[in-house]
Amino acid sequence: MKTKINTLYLLLAFTVITFAGCGQDGVQGPAGVNGQNADVFYSEWFSPTAWSGTSGDWYFSAAAPDLTQDIVENGVILAYVWLDGDLYSSTSVRPLPAYAVGANWSFLIHQYGSIEFTSDMINQPLTATNKFRFIAIPGTSVALKSALSKYPTRSALMNMPYKEACTLFKVSDKQLMVK
């Protein structure tokens, strides 16, 4: 008899706990700043004004105030490039890191609030005709959690096609001004 009563209490406790979590949805969160998704930050397309470095080790830095310590340490940074003369596909945007136009292209966060793009070309890369962009997704972003169901590793996520990233993270996809 005591076992039946304990089982009844456990069943009652389980039922209460199960339904206690059900309720009304929360209040809608704030809209993004300057038309951006409230959870995701992204740059416009930009070209370097000058490359620094030497043959095989070129780089340029860009200010990126949205790349805070929290986003860099707990979120994901996606970076993309469109390269003039890309024989693979002159109309495609590549996720970084990538190999194209005879060189490796990549990016790194060398300090919070800044992003550095790199290339190991022998000759200095072009400036005005190559285009770069980044998308910063905080670790708490609902969209990031959704993306991780399809791209379960950080490496897979960083190789997400550009158009898919724009759709998934609600990034304004302004057209590149290319030849």
Image (tube, rainbow, N blue to C red):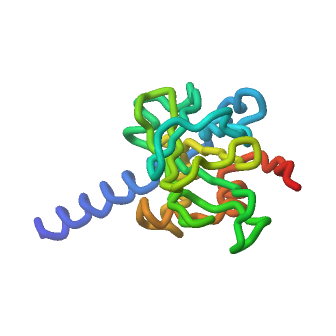
* Residue 89, percent from left and from top: 74, 71
Q: Residue at x 53, y 56 (%)?
A: 121
Does residue 90 lie above or below 33 as drawn? below
**Residue found at x 54% / y 57%:** 96
- Quarter of the image with the C terminus is bottom right
Nearer the observer, 29 or 5: 29
Q: Position of residue 31 (x, y in %)?
A: 72, 32
Choose top left, top right, bottom left or bottom right for residue 60: top right
Rendered location of residue 164, percent (x, y) = 68, 63
Looking at the image, which is closer to me, 17 or 90?
Answer: 90
* Residue drawn where x is 71% and y is 39% of the image: 46
* Of residues 162 and 171, the one drawn nearer to the viewer in this rendering: 162
Q: Is residue 157 above or below residue 71?
A: below
Q: In the visual, does 111 lie left or right of 27? A: left
Whether 21 is drawn above or below 162: the answer is: above
Which residue of the protein is positioned furthest toward the left in this rendering? 2
Image quarter in which the N terminus is found: bottom left
